[in-house]
Amino acid sequence: MHSSRNTDSVSFSRVIDRLIDSLRVLPGVGPKSAQRMAFYLLERNTKGAVQLSESLKDAVEKVGHCNKCRTLTEEETCAICMNPGRDQSKLCIVETPADALVVEKATGFRGLYYVLMGHLSPLDGIGPKELGLKNLADRLDADEVEELILATNPTVEGEATAHYISEMARKRDIHTTRIAHGVPMGGELEYIDGGTLSHAFADRREV
């Protein structure tokens, strides 16, 4: 009589299991993908594994948030905010540092950014405080911003966030535009091709 064995319960050494579990913190990485990554690093690219480990440790210890726009940087103030050649009168609102990067690469925008690090989502406990909207309000009150460009993702949460911020700007009589929806509803800026994003950015509309 053959004994049945649940292969899902098979484990390797404690160290390997920990590596696999650690890789699963990455978005979209399930158990099997994490296992493949772990075995690849251990079997075929130990040098790359060491470099990855050192780079992650270095980044976690040194990278923080810009004190003006909240993007990720190892300096107190990021290079874009420090650049005197940027147009101080235009402020583009994005959800993530990746969104700011793709706007920067795909468009001719030469203003400044404000990175929310997310979007309004009351069910997840993400409100105005978590998005740094008090700091944004302080920037709007400083009278430097003449146009606020809303480039949050065209999702339900992104639209709600854009509406909330547009009301903040309206109370201060600041001209506000929203990037055009050549960007598909439900999409995320990070994965939109440059041509589509550039067109949407150029055709932004008033809100």
Image (cartoon, rainbow, N blue to C red):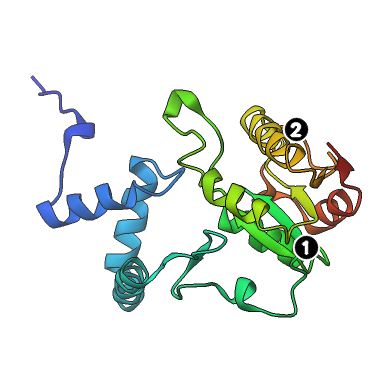
What's the residue at 68%, 43% (across, down)?
152
Q: Earlier in the sequence, mark 2 or mark 1?
A: 1
Nearer mark to the viewer, of 2 and 1: 1
Secondary-structure class at tag 2: loop
The quadrant where residue 105 appears: bottom right
User: What kind of residue is marked 1?
Assistant: Ser
Q: Residue furthest top?
A: 1
From the image, which quarter does the C terminus lie in?
top right
Q: Residue furthest right?
A: 203
The quadrant where residue 99 appears: bottom right
Mark drawn on residue 198: none
Mark 2 vs mark 1, CA separation in Å = 28 Å
Instruction: Return the residue at label 1.
Output: 89
x and y, in percent, of residue 106 in the image: 78, 63
Task: Out of 145 and 110, give the one closest to the viewer.
Answer: 145
Q: Is residue 170 left or right of residue 153?
A: right
Q: Are marks 2 and 1 in contact (CB under 8 Å)?
A: no
Q: Does residue 117 appear anywhere in the picture?
A: no
Neighbourhood count class around disc 1 (C-alpha, 10 Å): few under 14, some 14–19, many 20 upward: few
Q: Is residue 140 left or right of residue 134?
A: right
User: What kind of residue is marked 2?
Assistant: Met
x and y, in percent, of residue 29 in the image: 41, 45
Neighbourhood count class around disc 2 (C-alpha, 10 Å): few under 14, some 14–19, many 20 upward: few
What's the residue at 10%, 24% (across, down)?
3
x and y, in percent, of residue 17 in the image: 18, 49
Task: Out of 31 and 105, give the one closest to the viewer.
Answer: 105
Rendered view: 45 above or below 118: below
Mark drawn on residue 185: 2
What's the residue at 55%, 44% (across, down)?
133
